[in-house]
Amino acid sequence: MKPDSEKKEKSNYSVEAHLIYGQSQDPKWDYSHHLLPPISASATFRLDSAQRGAEGFAEFAHASDDLTVKSKAPIYIYDRLGEPNKDMLEENLAYAEGGDIAVTFASGMAAISGVLGILTGSGSEIIAHQTLYGCTYSLLTNWYPRLKISSAFIDLTNPNELKRHITKKTRVVYMESPVNPTLRLIDLNAVADIVKEVNAKRTEEERIYTVVDSTFASPFGQRPISLGIDFVVHSLTKAIGGFGTDIGGVVIGPKWSYDRLMLYRKDFGGVLSPRSAWEVLVHGLPSLGLRMRQMQVTAQKVAEFLATRPEIECVQYPGLPQFGQAELAQRQMIDYDGNFAPGGMIYFVLKGDSPAGQLKRAERFINHVAQNSYCITLAVSLGNIRTLIEHPGSMTHSAIPPEEQLAKGLNPGGIRLAIGLEKPEDIIKDLSASLEATR
Ligand SMILES: *Cc1c(COP(=O)(O)O)cnc(C)c1O
């Protein structure tokens, strides 16, 4: 093998080439005769001497200056502290988001609790957008109050709301964009600017950090760090993993956070399995661009179809000309080549004469899809190669009390459609049949 210095400069190639090749050779593990990296399948690692073991423990979470390309192989000790598959995946995930570092976790929720875990402590306050993924909402409302971490839920689609809710105790501003499931957008650059302005007058200990759950867009569809956001989290289970085989999560952020995230993960224990890391490294990330590009062509056609249907009250898809935040969408949701990337998620509301009537109709429609569709499956999750449909009000967002859902923009008749890799005609065939049968 040629030494790294003699190899072609990777910055001459596109981001997507890097998502396929990653750090194609690596001092961490000699697999130069394999086309693909092997799967690490060892819970513990052989050490040559007690000194080497001691050195390994001393080095752990004391990152060198160069976090990505280490000059020498790290000393692996035990899978929960680190192993090569996760290291390779993390290098590539950090690159995909344009962040300094990435630390993977056992699930998206483990990643969210990991980043909030290192940024908050007893007495801290989190400001969050009012609509959040149900389990994140439950984490903030059911568990954090026990640790004396409180949360204020506000409408961050209007960033000007933020200033008057920030207090001395605020440590984190947390949001999803697009918002799950309504696909409303938050102006990430505007939020980051407001927080920067406040931080300019604060000490290091009082600093506020911005965290974005960018799962809906995937790194292909937007890069919040480039807009001034501090941390990005993803559920790897969704578009990045892509095939629905594994659960996983990741936090991408600034260099200083690497050691803290690694220590947190070691002690709370939510590590990604090397087999799951390998799936994302070998199948998920290399095909992300191809899948997302195809999904959004399909999503556009399906959203246009839904917008013509008399049974439907409204369709939310950032690629539709009537999308309420079209200017923001086109500024914020862009792929690696600078093209508009409206993504593969659609939210639509069925008509009904009352919220109860809408709910009934949504249930009848979803049940008809579940029992009759070939190309649409009733299942939670998204970014999968199969198109999935679900009813957020009673499923992913049921942790939010029904009486609060409406105020948070969650209509009882709302339906979330996560486009897969089928042809648009096939998805439309199934949707038409169920719309007609449940009129
Ligand atoms: C699925 C999801 C999560 C949680 O991820 P898991 O991998 O299921 O733990 C968090 N945020 C969003 C937006 C999600 O869709």
Image (cartoon, rainbow, N blue to C red):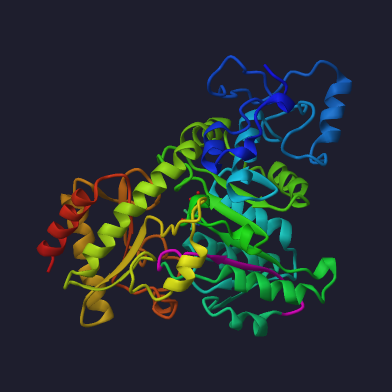
Q: Quadrant of the C terminus?
A: bottom left
Seen at 63% across and 23% down, the residue is 42
Q: Which residues are magenta?
A: 167-182
Viewer-nearest residue: 258 or 319: 319
Viewer-nearest residue: 135 or 430: 430
Seen at 41% across and 75% down, the residue is 405
Viewer-nearest residue: 356 or 347: 347
Classify residue 254 as left or right of residue 271.
right
Viewer-nearest residue: 15 or 396: 15
Q: Position of residue 213 (x, y in %)?
A: 55, 59
Seen at 58% across and 14% down, the residue is 33
**Figure disc tally:** 0
Q: Is residue 90 visible?
A: yes
Q: Position of residue 388 (x, y in %)?
A: 31, 51
Classify residue 181 as left or right of residue 359.
right
Question: Which quadrant would residue 162 be assigned to in this image?
Answer: bottom right
Seen at 53% across and 43% down, the residue is 248
